[in-house]
Amino acid sequence: MDKYTAGLRETAFEYGIKRLAHDLDMSEGRLYKKLDPDGPVSLTLADFFRINRILNDVRCLDRALEDLGMVATPVAESTDDIEGEIRELLLDSHDMAASFTRVIRAAKADGEICDDDLAEIKALRRELAVMGNTVMSRIEAMHANGKAALKAVK
């Protein structure tokens, strides 16, 4: 197993193997074997998605998407207060962009960007991408529902 399944293993153990095995209608022993990176039983793609549906935790997919240079975007559950949500997202993204810039400036200050600096920069960039994609998906949802999509950014 690799980083694609690391998030899945992490969330599975937090959720509880006994509970997850029951939800999957699978024995605990078999589930342990499937989740063991060096185990004799392979975790299939179908297993991965079945487990992910039950756990409903983005860490299951985040590492795989990160390896592909992608981010997941949460889907709007309701359009009732989508304008308020967009306003909040825009304010949060402004703060996040300022943090991103601040971290880059601090990392460059000594003329060398170390591994820890790079990891922090990548994490913030990823969060900023998720935030931007989320704002865009909400604006698209407003457009699809016939609302004035950019009214929320005034």
Image: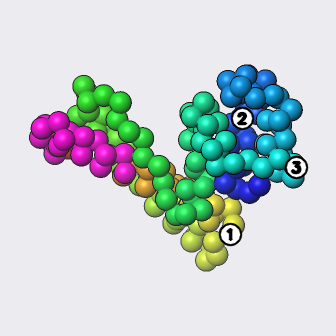
Q: Which residue is identified by label 3?
A: 40
| Type of amino acid at the residue the image marks with label 1 | Cys
Q: Which residue is identified by label 2?
A: 12
Label 2 element class: helix
Front position among marks 2 and 1: 2
Label 3 element class: loop
- CA gap between label 3 and label 2 equals 18 Å
Give the image quarter of residue 32. top right
Q: Residue at x 38, y 39 (%)?
A: 75
Mark earlier in primary sequence (3, 1): 3
| Type of amino acid at the residue the image marks with label 2 | Ala
Prevalent SS, magenta region: helix
Q: Residue at x 82, y 51 (%)?
A: 37
| Type of amino acid at the residue the image marks with label 3 | Pro
Residue 141 lies, in percent from the top left, at: 24, 40
Q: Residue at x 68, y 69 (%)?
A: 114
Label 1 element class: loop
Q: Which segment is the magenta one?
A: 133-151
